[in-house]
Image (cartoon, grey):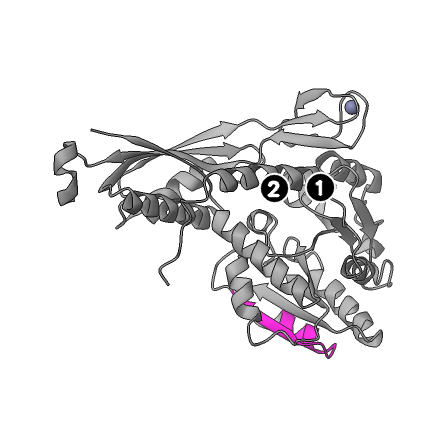
């Protein structure tokens, strides 16, 4: 008759495993990956444009991979910086996964790349669940999106190593309540650094580059409370039940 | 909607386990879904049914058990239910050195096999 088997395996074990492998492979060649998450229209591309330009002027070999459901507009904008840029069209998939990213890097990412910026699909829900092998996860929110964004998307904000507020030049017009935003971020991610930026005025310009370079130099990024729990839960599940590893037939 | 990717991952892992154990079908899959896992149960249900089609897992019931998010303060040892949206700052001392005890689970607990009219006939599939 019916029998039950105890599996105890993390649903995202395969992605997490691929992410660990990719992180190790990147580290071995001296590259740090930065995963950028935000809603559509929050100004991710404008900020990235500025950071790529700064990096190029400082002689830091950078590259950017940008993922969108459709269109190559972002890549065209970013490529003006002179950095290697790759556009990934997800054909409707709402997020990147580690295996996909690894596949896109093969044969494209120049050997001397020190910083790889990955502009995830504009979405604060789905990409949050997928470790891409990054060493720095940055969540962006513009001042026009409302102070309660961190509470509406706690997983995305809760897993960030750094939070950037964009379009700070519009803060007054948008009646952005900075103190309320900071309190909401602190609630889901105590101790995370929040930096106000504006691609238009240059406020906070280069912060992302500085933090990424610090990680490249070995600085430990802020460790979110939520990330610790994830490693704990997944790690244990995997170590005790390693035999039931799923392998894709392809 | 990443629930589709999650449903596909569940089905792939359960189907692999079914093959490994030589089981012809699956009656029930039990999941632990943490409050902070970022998964919408209804969306997962819907996607699971689609992801099962044509696999050994087709027809299986998905039972997603929600796991409450709880945290503990390292400074004052207070434990609390963090709620949703979560509050991960210590309610007692306000400290930020906090350990999340549960709430991020996204785990297959166990699987109940189906299609075994009796144990000896199991091999004919
Ligand atoms: Zn405390």
The C terminus of chain A appears in which quarter of the rendering? bottom left
Q: In which quadrant of the rendered view does residue A51 lie?
A: bottom right
| Residue A40 locus on image (x, y percent) | 63, 56
- Say if residue A70 shows up in the picture: no
Disc 2 is attached to a residue of which chain?
Answer: A
Q: Is residue A192 magenta?
A: no
Q: Nearer the viewer, residue A209 or A164?
A: A209
- Numbered label attached to residue A53: none
| Residue A174 locus on image (x, y percent) | 79, 48
Q: Nearer the viewer, residue B44 or A71?
A: B44
Where disc 1 sits, the SS reads: loop
For label 2, the residue is: A231
Where disc 2 sits, the SS reads: helix
| Residue B64 locus on image (x, y percent) | 43, 32
In the displayed structure, would residue A99 be above or below residue B68?
Answer: below
Mark 2 in CB contact with mark 1 (< 8 angstroms): no
Q: Is residue A78 magenta?
A: yes
Disc 1 is attached to a residue of which chain?
Answer: A
Q: Which residues are magenta?
A: A74-89
Q: Going 69% across and 31% down the picture, which residue do you hit? A: B99
Q: Residues within 10 Å of mark 2 (few under 14, many from 20)?
A: few
For label 1, the residue is: A224
Q: In which quadrant of the rendered view does residue A209 lie?
A: bottom right
The N terminus of chain A appears in which quarter of the rendering? top left
């Amino acid at each position: 008759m019916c029998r039950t088997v105890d599996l105890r395996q993390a649903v995202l074990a395969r992605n997490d495993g691929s992410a660990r492998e990719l992180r190790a492979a990147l580290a071995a060649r001296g590259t740090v990956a930065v995963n950028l998450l935000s809603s559509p229209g929050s100004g991710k591309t404008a900020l990235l444009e500025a950071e790529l330009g700064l990096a190029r002027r400082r002689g830091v070999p950078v590259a950017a991979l940008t993922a969108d459901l459709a269109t190559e507009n972002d890549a065209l904008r970013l490529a003006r910086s002179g950095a290697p840029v790759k556009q990934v069209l997800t054909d409707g998939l709402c997020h990147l996964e580690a295996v996909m990213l690894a596949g896109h890097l093969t044969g494209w990412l120049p050997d001397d790349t020190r910083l790889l910026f990955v502009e995830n699909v504009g979405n604060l829900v789905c990409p949050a669940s997928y470790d891409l092998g990054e060493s720095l996860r940055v969540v962006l929110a513009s001042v026009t999106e409302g102070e309660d964004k961190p509470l509406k998307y706690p997983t995305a904000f809760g897993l960030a190593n750094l939070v950037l507020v964009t379009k700070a030049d519009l803060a007054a017009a948008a009646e952005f309540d900075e103190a309320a935003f900071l309190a909401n971020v602190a609630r889901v991610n105590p101790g995370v650094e929040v930096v106000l930026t504006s691609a238009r005025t240059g406020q906070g310009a280069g912060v992302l580059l500085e933090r990424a370079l610090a990680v490249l130099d070995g600085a430990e990024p802020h460790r979110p409370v939520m990330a610790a729990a994830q490693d704990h839960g997944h790690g244990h599940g995997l170590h005790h039940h390693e035999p039931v590893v799923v392998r894709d037939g392809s | 909607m990443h629930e589709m990717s999650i449903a596909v991952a569940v089905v792939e892992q359960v189907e692999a386990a079914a093959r490994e154990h030589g089981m012809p079908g699956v009656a029930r899959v039990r999941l632990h879904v943490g409050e902070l896992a970022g998964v919408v149960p209804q969306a997962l249900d819907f996607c699971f049914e689609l992801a099962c089609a044509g696999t050994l897992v087709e027809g299986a019931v998905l039972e997603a058990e929600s796991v409450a998010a709880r945290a503990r303060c390292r400074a004052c040892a207070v434990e609390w239910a963090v709620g949703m949206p979560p509050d991960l700052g210590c309610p007692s001392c306000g400290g930020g050195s906090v350990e999340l005890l549960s709430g991020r689970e996204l785990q297959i607990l166990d699987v109940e096999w189906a299609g075994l009219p009796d144990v000896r006939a199991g091999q004919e599939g």
